[in-house]
Structures are given as structure tokens and as C-alpha cells.
Amino acid sequence: MDVQTFTQVCVNALLLGGMYAVISVGLNLIFGVLKIINFAHGELIMLGMYSAYWLTTLYNLNPYISIPIVAMLLFLVGVAIERVLIKPILKAPEVNQLLTTAALILVLQNLALILWRADYRGVSVYVPTITLGSLYIPGTRLAAFVGGLITSLTLYYVLMKTDVGRRIRAVAQDPEIASVLGINVSVIQTLTFGLGALLTGIAGTLLIPIYMVNPMVGGTFGLIAWIIIVLGGLGSFVGALIGSFIIGFIEAFVGALISLEIARVVAFMIFIAILFIKPTGLFGEKARV
Amino acid sequence: MALLEVRNLSKRFGGLWALKNVSLDINDGEILGIIGPNGAGKTTLFNCITGYYRPDSGKVIFQSRDITGLPPFKIARLGIARTFQLTKAFNNLTVLDNLRIAALSRGTDLNEVLEVIKLVGLEGKRNSLASSLTILERKRLELARALVIKPKLLLLDEVMAGLKPHEADELLDVILRINKSGVTIAIVEHVMRTIKKVCNRVVVLDFGVKIAEGLPEEVMRDEKVIKAYLGEEFVA
Amino acid sequence: MKSLKLNRIIPITLILLIGYLIPIIPLPPYIMHVFILVVMWAYLSTAWSILGGAAGQLSLGHAAFFGTGAYTTYFLTVWFGLPPLMNLLVSGLTASLLSVVIGYPCFRYGLRGVYFALATIAFTEIMKDLFIYLRELTGGSLGVWMPVLPEGITTLYFLGKEAYYYVITTLYVVLMIIINLMGRFREYLTAIREDEDVSASIGINVTRYKLLALMISSFFVGVGGAYYICYFRYINPYVAFGLDTSLQMVLIGIFGGMYSFWGPLIGSVILTPIGEYLRITLGGTYVGSHLLIYGLLLILIIRFLPKGIYSILESIYSKYLVRGG
């Protein structure tokens, strides 16, 4: 591989990593605070993508402008899901939680299938491709990367510097103590899930100019998100970021060297390997179940 | 030849040595007490003996056989039974079912199981779900389960925790009966009263190191032991 | 799960009788098809529940074994001209061996709960991606078709559906017989499901029994996949290794009640016809509505009746029987 190709692949890897970071950051937040495994995360992204698609198509909006609207929409969806589905089973055995969110996958996928059919839908947005010498940086991917970066930083700021953020972190650390300190744990849980969904909304909007959407795309995105946060360590913000870039690099390089489909297979195999070696992930604190 | 020999056992977690070069014997038929302040390494010792942890160095020899590093189920099959600090049981099964499965594993027949139930005092609760038992009853169940697999050595990990004094006394009686039926016992404890009442010998650990060993009265007058528990000022 | 020996023989014989006698009534092919589906999913789900229910290891990737079974039968039939009847067995064995590949490391390293579920999902995704990628070998995403063969039991090719029904019913009966014979094994699995540490402390080799449960479970699911392709004559990686397929096995078991081996049958008897009905009536305009209903039902069952429909039957049953011991 010559230097030129190598650099291009590195650029691809970075862009990919950034996108993956956006996909996975919401999942981590939900797990960190509610300690629940949301298998349907990918489907929320899918909903975000569809929302952006419809807003763009029906109202001729530029998808990037629709971000706040989609974010709000998905926030409401998240709140609804949390109140109706999640809250009742927060104390249930883990198996039941797993199955409920797995069932949610079926519900959301097929709801989408019924409403919007199986056709792939895409959005074409004119975002100029940046060319630096021989480096080729697709504008949509750069936008996703930048969008992801801004989102992550904003989330970080919210969690660290705002009052709400502090409460969220308190509940994440210890719900009992948090409630003794006067924090309404139940509201925070709902809020956090909503926030996680909001983040998937943003992710979906950033992704729709790049990937086509159909009811089944949630599966792949969801699995990647899971791989990333397990790799990085469940609940670790930094871990998820690093995990995203590791997966991005693996996919970019394997994709360039062998093929794109194998890239995914390799990423999954590495994931399984990590599960055996260190299930708590690179930065994870939670002990193995 | 002691029933169980621990030789130079060491175990560390990260940078911390939970056990450092600990050696002790458990003699056939005795009740050995293992005491020490919190964090002394008592449960770590048990976990190393029963295969839940792998020691970093040293050996555990049971009936002249090196059992260091064997998995827990193998050690159970060789004749060492244990109880858990936080009582564990098959919660959705009845007391009898809990014990039947243990018996299945060992080849114990139903009559022997019923005897054990009588020995630990759980006859009335035979068909109750394990999840419905009180703390004392759960501890009896733990003892019963350990007995059903016909061990030569029984390790009890802070089995008195959470019991009121009269409950503790009842459990102590069961433990003495178990010992009389031929089972050697090692008991990790905090409560001095228990130790005095029941142990033939005592070993004291502090910060992963054995600091004293001997008869209960001797050990409890030992300066090092007093210092470990109460600090410098209390050494008379 | 104490067995109520004599009291069970009567309902069992009844069910068997009904099961085998159904085709005697002349039924339209479509109804026969539904019966086949009911038994097939009962069979697959029961096989899954050996690991998922009895042993408590929630696998969400059992499609890996299903697809392996289907494709193995295809390869053996088309490439080597071997009779499908025999290929059923080989498919099962292949699936079983494959299960060791994922199962041994998982159990040896103590992967449980979520982590295990995730590993199984990832594993099945790998299978799916591989089969799509290796298109010269496997036909890729277009799938493969079983060729037309002379009719007969050895070729497992029949023009009428009744024969197919007998085959799957027999497979199911064989599975149930084998499960019933494994009394002691089932007790160990129950122990493992309840508490692995306690099980180890009483001398149960947890890793070994989990692996055995997986191997047996995957064997039968593999045979099920082989049957699938012999009946449907077509399969592609999305069906063979799809999450839908895995979830359906799980759902039916949970709905019916996974702590009993009759649960999956009950679940399938209720859910499969509903699913098929929805698929026919709404399927044209509303593709996927049956899966949507499945998903909703699963959520409801977990919330309000986690032990499945069987638990209702059990409480009725126990009101009329004297408990021994």
C-alpha cells in the first residue's frame, strides 16, 4: 500500500470512527444510567434516519437543518418507550430486560416496514467533497464526523457542567444515594433514555445523506454500537470514543486490503475475541455478570 | 499428615497482596477458626482453597493430593464443601429439590438426604421454596447442601453474619453436630464468642499474613493479635 | 419440575394421537401447511429451550445452527448426491460441531447473560455475512434451491403435504422422547440455571453441561434447518441466519413457557396460526404485521406472565392433583 492510499485509508478510518462514535454514544449513556441493555438501539437510529428522510422529502428541508426537529421527535419517542416499556421492567431479572428490548426490535422494524415499506430510501444533499491534494474527503462524511464531534463535546459539557448533567451522573453512580440527596431518580431515568434517543436522532440525521435507510438497517448499526461500547467498556464515555475509532480503523483497513464485507466479519470476530479476553472492555468498570 | 495443608500461599490483586506466604494445616477432625480484621484475606484464602481463585504461588494439598488451581467443581468432588458469605441457593426450587440435586451429583440416596435435613433442623421446611426461607433457615440450607455431598472438610465463610445471638447459638449447635459426625471444619469468623465456643485451634491473619496460631485463649491474649484488631494503644 | 408420572401419560398419549391422526381428515393444503409450521416451530423452539430454558443461557443466535443445517443438507444433496434423509443427521452433527466453536470459548471464559447473548448475535451475523460473501459456493444473497428429486422418504421430497407433516411430527416426537430420557441431565441444567456458583460447589461441571446442552440443542436445530430446506425447497442467508429466525425460536418458547418442555408447543399452537393468519390477510398491504404482533405479545408476556402460558396451565393442573413428597 503506497503512502497515498494509506493516508486515504487513514482519513476514511477517522471519518468512519467519528460516525461510529455518534452511533454509540447514546447507547452508553442509557446503559450507564439505567443499567439496562437496549438491544433496539439500532432501530432508534433507523427511526431517526426515517424522520430526517421524511422531513427532507416532504418539506424540502436540508437534512442538517432538520437535526433539532428530529432530535426533539426522537426525544419524545425515547421518553414514551421508557415510561411504557422500560420503567416497569427495571427491577426485573436481566433475561426479561434483554428479551423486552429484543422484542422491541421486532416491533420497531415491522412498524417501519408497515408504514414505509421495504424500499431503500435515501436523501441527496449537496455537500461538496473536499480534496486536499490527492486526498478525497466526502463532504457528507466530514459533516457526519464534525456533527458527531460537536454532539459528543456538547454531551460532555452537559454531563459535566450543567445541573441536569450532574444529576444524571449521580444516578449513574448510585441511584439510592442520589434519591436520598433529593434527586428524582425516576424522572432522571426517563430523561436519560429520552436523551439517548435524541442522540440517535442526531445520528440518524447525520447518516441519512450517507447511507440509505430501510427498516432493517437498524440491525447492523445496533450491533456495531454494541460492539463499540463493549469494546470500550460498558459505561465508559472515553472507552466508547476509542472503541469507535478502533472499529473504524479495522473496517477501513480490512475493507481496503480485502473487501468491505469481510471488514465487518473481521470486526465481529474481534468483538467476540474481546468478549473472551476482557468482557469489561478497555476501560470498563462493571464486573462481568 | 494433616487433612489439608496450605503451603506458602500467595495471591495478589493488581498491586495488592491479599495473601502473602500463608501456611497452615487443618487437622483431621478438628474445628479450626480463621480470624482476622476486615481485609485480612480470610475469604481469599477460602477461595484459593476451593478453586474460585488461582493462587499466584504456593500449594494446597488435600489428603496428600495437590489440588492447587483445580476448578471448584473438582474440589467439591474431592471432598471439600463450602458455604457462601451471602447465602446462595436455588431460589425457585424447594428445599428438598435443592438437596436432591446435590445428592444426585454425589450419589447420595434419599434417606441420607432426609437425615441431613433432620440434622440441620429443616424438616418443617422441606417443601418450602428456598426463596421463602428466613436468614437462619437459609444458612441451615447451606449447611445441609454442603453435607449432602459428603465432604471430609467443610469450609464455613462468616456463617454467623446477620444472625441474632440466639440464632447464632442454634447454628453453632448444628455445626458441632456436623463435626461430631466426622466432618472436619474450618470456620472464618469475626465473632469472638463463636470462636471461643467451638474452635479447637485458631489461626489469625492480618493483611494477608499469618500472625498467630494456637489455642483460642492463647491467641486472644497474643499482643500481635490485639494490636491488629484494636491498634497499638490497647496492648496491655 | 417434579414429574407426575402416571398423570402425564394420558395427556401425552392424547396429544400424540391427535398429532398423528390429523392428516387423516382431508384438509386443504394450506391448512396442512399451517399444521406443519406449528409443529416445526414447536420443534425448533423446544430444541432452543434445551439451552435457553433448561440451562438458562439465553442464545439469540440459534439461527446459526438452523442455517448451517439447511445449507449442509443442500451441499450434501447437490454436490455429493447424498440422500436427504441421511443428510438430516449429518446436518445436525455439523451444526453441533459448529456450536462447539462458539460455545466452548464462551462457557470456558464464563460469558453469561448479556455478553453471551451478544456473542451469539455477533456469531450469527458473521455466518450471515460469510454466506453472502462466498457467493460462488453458497449462492450469495440470492439463496439456493433444492432440486426436484424422485419422491420418497429417502429423498424427503413429497408432492403431498401430509408426508411432510408426518416427518416433522416424528422429529418432534423423537426430540421429546430424548428430552424425557435425560432426567438427570435436566436436573443439572436446572441447577446451573438457578445458580452456577452453587452448582459448582456441589460438584457439577458447569462448563461441560452447558456445552452439552448447547451441542444437543444445536444438533436438533440443525436437523430442523435441514427439514426446512427439504420442505420449503429454498433458503437464503437472511432467513437462514436472520435475527428474525432466532427471535422466533425464542419468542415461541418464552410465550409458551420456557421452564417446561411443553411450553414451546403451546406457544407455537397459539402463535403460529395467528402469525400465518395475519400474514395472509394483512401481509400483502402490511408486510411484517405478524412479526409486529409477535413482538408486542412477547413484551406483554414478559411483563405480565414471564413464565409463559404454561404457568397458567400448571396452576390449574396443580389444583387437581395431590402433590407427592
Image (cartoon, coloured by chain):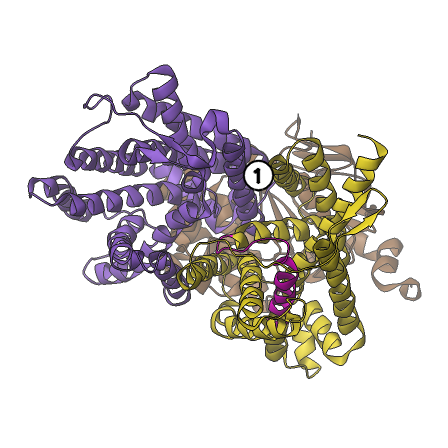
Left or right, B207 with reference to C58: right
Query: A13 above or below C295?
Result: above
Horizontal side of B170 relative to A20 (left or right) equals left
Tint applied to chain C in the drawing: purple
Q: Is residue A111 left or right of residue A154?
A: left
Rendered brown, the chain in question is B
Residue sitting at 75 percent across and 53 percent down?
A129
Q: What's drawn in magenta, residue-wise?
A: A194-216
Residue C134, given in percent of the width and then of the height, sits at 52, 29
Residue C165 is situated, as x and y percent measured from the top left of the image, at: 19, 37
Where residue A27 sits in the image (x, y, percent)? 63, 60
User: Residue A277 in the image: x percent, y percent?
Assistant: 68, 39
Q: Which of the two residues, C112 or C10, is positioned nearer the viewer here? A: C112
Image quadrant where residue C312 sits: bottom left
Three-letter code, disc 1: Cys
Horizontal relation, residue A111 to residue C27: left or right: right
- Residue linked to disc 1: C106
Number of labels in the image equals: 1
At mark 1, the secondary structure is helix
Image quarter for residue C213? top left
The dominant secondary structure in magenta is helix
Q: Chain of mark 1?
A: C
Q: Is residue A207 magenta?
A: yes
Q: Check the rendered structure and report the hue given to chain A.
A: yellow
Quadrant of residue C179 within the rendered picture: top left
At 61% from the left edge and 71% from the top edge, which residue is drawn? A61
